[in-house]
Image: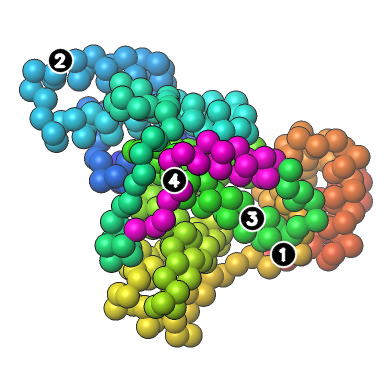
Amino acid sequence: MTNFDEYIRQGEPSRKEKAQIWQTAIGLQDVDGLKPSEYLLQTARENIEGDITIDEVKKRIDSYYKQQSSRQNAETERTEEADKVSARITEILSNNTFSFSPLEYINIHRRLFTGIYKFAGKIRDYNITKNEWVLTGKSVFYPDCSMISQTLDYDFAQEKQFDYGQLDVVQSVQHIAKFISGLWQIHAFGEGNTRTTAVFAIKYLRSFGFEINNTLFAAYSWYFRNALVRANYNDLKNNIKATTEYLMKFFGNLLLGEKNELKNRYMLVGGEFQSAISSDNDVSKSKICTLNCTLEEFFVLDFLKENPKATQKEIALHIKKSERTVKTLTTALQEKGLLERKNGKRNGFWKILNS
């Protein structure tokens, strides 16, 4: 990892948030086997401590590699990519702006890889296959390059029109997971596809109101990628079907505070753990949250868990809804037996009834 843990455990809120974002940005490089330099780690520390801005971080990294240009080799180029893309991911995740559109998705790729790939921010114009470790060398089927733009437009349009209002929290997370896995499978970009999809996914999940545990992406970025692969691979002849089971375990930990075991080897097709996965030995069982509530109700519960004395006005500000909507939500949660109001109006507090 990145030795930023002391900031996360003991640091003030601003340092903690910066450290989590840096851990995510650096951890995501692992999906392509990239490791950051010691120079990047030290520069990131200065940013976390507030000594330099993210713009200054980017300038320092650019200057550092200009000085190294006469000694460039393949290994240095990979480290340069890890350093520059880590800084750019940190910049994007530190910014709360977001637009749900194919243009935003493509723009994230452009911002991450300008100066690194000639095709930064451009849809791939060639067809691809990729030998996947988790598939023992086989490849997911990716769309023909001539269909990428149309497929992106269609998927975004369908998701934008989707109504989450009648779904409980688990059904909502399942749908989001399916959308993200489908977006990844389009593989709009020749390289950097997973990192772009991960950054977009974090921004999209935040737009729902989820408090994202960024460190999970840092520690399990390789698992995240393999889960996306398994969500899009079918081999019916050998009784292997595409499944979002592993992705849901990741999202369960990421969004719902679950403690699912995330092991890459459990996903390996035809591996030694395949029989264990198929049997009833808890390897493949996800401890999925069973709360009977909607996403909005879940966000209320999640906030009240840490802020039991919050007023309806404070809840409304946090979940970005009106006080009238909050009153409706808290009433519904009380009727479902998930929330109780104690000690009246003036000195009262909220008690969550389902752990």
Residue 176 in view here: yes
- What residue is disc 1 on? 291
First in sequence, mark 1 or 4: give its number. Answer: 4
Mark-to-mark CA distance, 1 and 4:
40 Å
Q: Nearer the viewer, mark 1 or mark 3?
A: 3
Asked which secondary structure carries label 2, the reply is helix
Residue span colored magenta: 139-160
Q: Quadrant of residue 71?
A: top left
Mark-to-mark CA distance, 3 and 4:
25 Å
Identify the amino acid type marked 4: Asp
Q: Residue furthest bottom?
A: 280
Residue 301 in view here: no
Mark-to-mark CA distance, 2 and 4:
41 Å
First in sequence, mark 1 or 3: give its number. Answer: 3
Q: Nearer the viewer, mark 1 or mark 4?
A: 4
First in sequence, mark 2 or 1: give its number. Answer: 2
